Amino acid sequence: MPDVWVMGTTLHEGRSGQLVRADAITYLSATVDKVTASRIGSDEAATLAHKSAFGLGAPAPLLPEDFHLALLVTLGEAREQARDGKEDLVVVPGLDDNKEWDWSIVPVSELWTG
């Protein structure tokens, strides 16, 4: 079965962010500025969404109060899609056409430009 990944945002030009395998996430932390994920007991955390992420266009709005819960819903949808598919899926944070935060599910082949 394909894996589901979450692409973390980056605050620096020239970096493409981080990929975190969704089933490795055991802890989510959220503020109006960012959502971070880690594994319980680990000192390492990955920023999955940040209002000042590079490439969003300025100014980005604050993250919704329940954006981490929206991630959990989207991960459930991605896992369901992965069960029926043959390709890894990536959950990506971003702004929609209305400049509101959302999580998108994208096949990894659509992200790779190689």
Image: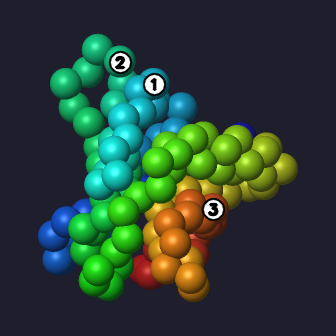
Q: Is residue 27 visible?
A: yes
Which quarter shows the N terminus?
Answer: top right
Q: Reading the chain from its start, which is encountered first: label 2 or label 1? A: 1
Q: Which residue is labeled 1 in the image? A: 26
Total number of numbered discs in the rendering:
3
Contact, mark 2 vs mark 1 (Cβ under 8 Å):
yes
Mark seen at residue 40: 2
Binning the other alpha carbons within 10 Å of mark 1 as few (below 14), some (14 to 19) or many (20 upward) gives few
Q: Quadrant of residue 53?
A: bottom left
Residue farthest top in this picture: 41
Query: Quick one: 33 or 38, which is closer to the camera?
Result: 33
In whole angstroms, how far apart are the C-alphas of marks 2 and 1? 6 Å
Q: Tell me which residue sits at (52%, 39%) in the image.
A: 22
SS of the residue under disc 2: loop
Q: Name the amino acid, label 1.
A: Thr
Q: Which residue is mark 3?
A: 105
